[in-house]
């Protein structure tokens, strides 16, 4: 299979249809001589189907391929493993193309690349390499294939697989050129297994950073320059991208958010459910998410809630343990848990890959508009810097800045880039005033939905960290007394196993309820913490209790790994070794650390549950407390394409989460002033510097 086919969908559609239907496989030509083409006359005289073939040799190069395919209605490229560069050359030409590769008992057909729709061939290869376990080896193999010039002898292909693949190629070619069937390989690759006789359709999302997509020329032909290829609209089933859309007002008026625990909300764009979003992003071969699994719990744990785990592909093309990021979700049903894991994965992916459209490096005084004082991100107290790898911020220090939107004024505000993505590209270590965190990063079904969730997370962590620093237990209740069926169901299941769950409604000046839940046990893990925030305290409590039930099975599994118990003992004996995220919850898995460090929570008297919700606007309450509320939409194009938005929210002065015993950010005023303003503690009170129990 050393050839590719040109199918011109011009005035000879009937001839093209008959020609393609007459062939068992569209890979039609085997050549032994120099490069040859049938019907090489003027374009109007070119046959509807032109077969080209080439033996190995120097004559077939980028310029030759570009000249051959110019003006074609469809190019079918099946060089595959034998001459990979041909695929890239055709891809760069910008003509419609259908790609395929054959190897032994497997064939991979697609993507069908049409102007104005779907991923290109390089997008597909980048996605596939990102899913490989060994990135270095996969990339080396890809680069070796790109260096090949001339056809190599391909592996033999069984006749049954050849005929099957040929039928698929013919169907796609007809659908893309003559209709009326809808092509299904736009943005997809079909993997055929000749041994198992199964076919699996894999989604391929365009890569926002794909260099081939950035430089591909506009298609010349019947379609106007700004219009998608006719088959592209048919493949997507969606209206023109230039059609007007309703505005998406991101300003949440209350702390109310959808009741389901999925971070991405109940639906994607256009009313699509998260099942459809999951289908578009998940594939072990080339997905943005390469794995999505239900988590098998320890036999001693209750069946509910369900927990799911999503693993991102290596989108940043890095080696080492950070290559594949795992995210989890929980829910009353399996579907809710999977939705939660996918939402968390898309949030993390966006935070790791998004790059700003506008950025500048300057001193704050030299910026051309309003800006956020970096001190309002809450830095460190003066006495902390001797033990930290971060520099003190000074007003003459240049930083990299990007823009956020103010919910108080509606205008743009410059903010340090460090505070927006999870992996900011900064010019040097001097710009890292603190370690990037996910504080205030959230995914949702719209910008407004994502912003609500992001703001609730900012409020949730601020309230918890201030309560922790001042040992404030809040209003304490037995989780069995919360007037919510699902909360009671989970609490009762744990109570039957000797685990008591208490919930603590924490003080805050925001129009939201923040609840801390603790699962107590006499055996490790002795204490497990979870947080939740919502306008309705019952739903805030449910979220916190479900988080306890999400974290506890993972802790149990870790404690069964050799060496973990010894690490727990060391963390319980001394807080200074607490350096990473996983150390925080492991420290309080030890009964002694839980008894001493969480005494103010364990000893708090339990009171009857009080009904009622927080009234008022969440944003207005935050503006009143902080002076402004800022947000940046950090949604990459590939995440936006599946109907999900990701937002980073910044509330100036609100206490952010930090990990490591020495890394608590103690340089803000709110940490000291809010308890006094609420009448709970004097401003001169000594802070609790023990590491918090959240992971």
Image: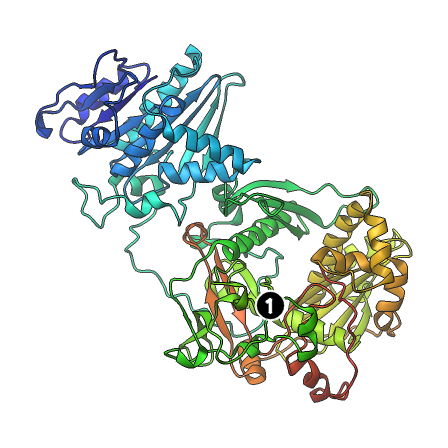
Q: List x then y, in percent, for residue 601.
A: 83, 71
**Splitting the image into 4 quarters, where does residue 237 fall?**
top left
Image color mode: rainbow
Q: Residue at x 46, y 73 (%)?
A: 398
Percent x, y of residue 604: 86, 74
Q: Position of residue 567 (x, y in %)?
A: 82, 52
Residue at the disc numbered 1: 434
Name the residue nearer the viewer: 676 or 317.
317
The N terminus sits in image quarter: top left
Residue drawn at 58 percent across, 57 percent down: 263
Residue 90, percent across and down?
A: 28, 33
> Is any atom of residue 286 visible in this view?
no
Q: In what quadrant of the picture does the C terminus appear?
A: bottom right
- 590 displayed left or right of 30: right
Q: Looking at the image, which is closer to me, 625 or 617? A: 625
Q: Secondary structure at mark 1?
A: loop
Location of residue 395 with respect to 131 vertically, above or below = below
The answer to whether residue 337 is above or below residue 538 is above
Q: Residues within 10 Å of mark 1 (few under 14, many from 20)?
A: many
Query: Is 274 located above or below residue 357 in the figure?
Result: above
Q: Looking at this view, is 110 or 30 the one in front?
A: 30
Lateral position of residue 321 relative to residue 204, left or right? right
Residue 437 in view (yes/no): yes
| Up-down relation of residue 297 to residue 622 (above or below) | above
Q: How many marks?
A: 1
Residue 28: name its quadrant.
top left
Is 196 situated left or right of 331 in this image? left
């Amino acid at each position: 299979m050393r050839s590719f086919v040109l199918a011109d969908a011009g005035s000879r559609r009937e001839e093209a249809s008959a020609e393609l239907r007459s062939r068992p496989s569209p890979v039609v030509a085997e050549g032994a001589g120099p490069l040859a083409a049938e019907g090489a006359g003027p374009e109007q005289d070119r046959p509807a189907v032109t077969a080209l073939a080439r033996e190995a040799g120097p004559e077939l190069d980028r310029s030759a391929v570009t000249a051959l395919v110019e003006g074609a209605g469809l190019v079918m490229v099946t060089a595959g493993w034998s001459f990979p560069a041909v695929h890239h050359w055709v891809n760069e030409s910008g003509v419609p193309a259908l790609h395929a590769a054959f190897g032994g008992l497997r064939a991979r057909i697609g993507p069908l690349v049409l102007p104005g729709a779907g991923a290109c061939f390089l997008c597909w290869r980048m996605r596939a390499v990102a899913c490989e376990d060994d990135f270095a080896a996969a990339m080396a193999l890809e680069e070796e294939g790109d260096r090949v010039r001339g056809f190599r002898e391909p592996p033999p292909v069984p006749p049954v697989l050849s005929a099957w693949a040929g039928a698929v190629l013919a169907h796609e070619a007809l659908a893309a050129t003559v209709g009326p069937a809808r092509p299904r390989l736009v943005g997809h690759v079909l993997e055929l297994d000749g041994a198992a006789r199964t076919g699996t359709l894999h989604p391929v999302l365009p890569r926002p950073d794909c260099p081939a997509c950035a430089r591909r020329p506009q298609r010349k032909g019947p379609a106007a320059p700004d219009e998608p290829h006719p088959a592209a609209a048919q493949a997507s089933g969606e209206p023109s991208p230039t059609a007007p859309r309703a505005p998406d007002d991101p300003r949440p008026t209350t702390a109310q958010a959808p009741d389901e625990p999925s971070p991405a909300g109940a639906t994607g764009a256009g009313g699509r459910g998260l099942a459809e979003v999951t289908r578009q992003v998940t594939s072990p071969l080339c997905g943005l998410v390469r794995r999505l699994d239900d988590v098998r719990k320890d036999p001693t744990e209750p069946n509910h809630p369900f927990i799911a785990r999503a693993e991102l592909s290596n989108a940043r093309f890095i080696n080492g343990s950070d290559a594949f990021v795992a995210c989890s979700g929980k829910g009353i049903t399996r579907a809710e848990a999977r939705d939660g894991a996918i939402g968390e994965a898309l949030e993390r992916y966006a935070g790791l890959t998004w790059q700003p459209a506008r950025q500048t490096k300057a001193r704050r005084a030299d910026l051309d508009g309003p800006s956020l004082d970096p001190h309002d991100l809450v830095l460190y107290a003066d006495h902390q810097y001797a033990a930290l790898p971060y520099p003190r911020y000074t007003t003459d220090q240049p930083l990299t800045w990007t823009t956020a939107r103010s919910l108080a004024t509606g205008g743009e505000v410059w903010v340090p880039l460090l505070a927006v993505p999870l992996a900011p590209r900064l010019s040097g270590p001097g710009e890292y005033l603190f370690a990037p965190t996910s504080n205030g990063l959230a995914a949702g079904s719209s910008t407004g939905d994502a912003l609500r969730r992001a703001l609730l997370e900012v409020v949730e962590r601020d309230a918890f960290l201030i309560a922790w620093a001042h040992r404030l237990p809040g209003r304490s209740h037995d989780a069995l007394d919360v007037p919510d069926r699902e909360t009671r169901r989970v609490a009762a299941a744990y109570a039957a196993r000797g685990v008591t769950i208490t919930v603590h409604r924490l003080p805050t000046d925001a129009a939201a309820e923040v609840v801390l839940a603790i699962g107590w046990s006499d055996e490790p893990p002795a204490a497990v913490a979870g947080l939740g925030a919502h306008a309705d305290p019952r739903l805030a409590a449910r979220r916190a209790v479900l988080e306890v039930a999400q974290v506890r099975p993972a802790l149990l599994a870790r404690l069964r790994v050799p060496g973990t118990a010894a690490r727990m003992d060391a963390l319980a004996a001394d807080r200074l070794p607490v350096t990473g995220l996983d150390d925080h919850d492991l420290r309080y898995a030890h009964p002694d650390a839980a008894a001493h460090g969480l005494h103010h929570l364990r000893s708090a008297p339990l009171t009857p549950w009080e009904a009622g919700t927080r009234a008022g606007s969440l944003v207005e309450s935050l503006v009143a407390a902080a002076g402004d509320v800022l947000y940046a939409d950090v949604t990459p194009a590939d995440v936006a394409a599946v109907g999900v938005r990701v937002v980073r929210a910044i509330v100036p002065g609100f206490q952010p989460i930090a990990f490591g015993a020495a890394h608590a950010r103690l340089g803000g005023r709110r940490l000291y002033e809010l308890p006094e303003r609420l009448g709970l503690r004097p401003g001169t009170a000594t802070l609790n510097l023990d590491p918090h129990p959240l992971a």
